[in-house]
Image (cartoon, grey):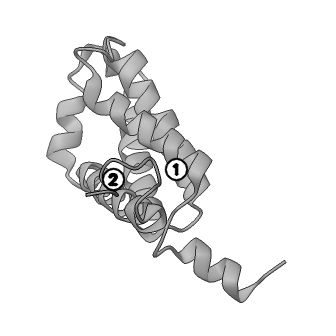
Amino acid sequence: MKQLFSSAPLYPEKALGIIRIAVGLLLAYHGLEVFDSEVMLGYLTWDVFKGNAGGFWVYLGKSSEFVAGVLLTLGLFTRLGAVITAGTLGYITFFVGNGKFWYEDQHPFMFVLFGALFFFTGPGAWSLDSLIKRSNPK
């Protein structure tokens, strides 16, 4: 009971690792749509993607979600994955969506916040980044 009311962290590295893996899996799952041509064609019907470069932006966005999700899940180049996450989902929040992250666009904006979290904190436990660091200390 004492730990519940304490301000001391509880297993911060493991908690961060679990959250990173869950966020990574969710991103990769959403990014899998890049491999479904019917779904991708559906995005091209959105007004924001009509025009010459619409297909490029749709495929770039979904590919970015997938790549960032894989990187975060594995904890490999975590900060790069975090930047890709924040950039891609920030674009979705403010340019594809309405930018109303306090109401309508909460889902993509939460991924922006997770991207910022992993950028500043690193991967936590169970990451390939920490294995690489251990095998190559400098």
Q: Amino acid at mark 2?
A: Val
Q: Is residue 52 above or below residue 128?
A: above
For residue 51, say whether it is visible.
no
In contact (CB < 8 Å): disc 2 and disc 1:
yes
Q: Amino acid at mark 1?
A: Phe
Residue depicted at 43% across the width and 42% down the height? 114
The image quadrant where one finds the C terminus is bottom right
Earlier-in-chain disc, 2 versus 1: 2
Residue depicted at 41% across the width and 17% down the height? 94
The image quadrant where one finds the N terminus is bottom left
Left or right of 70 in this view: 26: left
- Name the residue nearer the viewer: 70 or 10: 10
Secondary structure at numbered mark 1: helix
Residue depicted at 30% across the width and 59% down the height? 22
Residue 118 badge? 1
Q: Is residue 133 above or below residue 124?
A: below
Q: Where is residue 32 shown, x and y percent of the image?
A: 26, 55
Residue under label 2: 23
Q: Quadrant of residue 74?
A: bottom left
Q: Is residue 63 above or below residue 106?
A: below
- Name the residue nearer the viewer: 21 or 65: 21
Secondary structure at numbered mark 2: helix
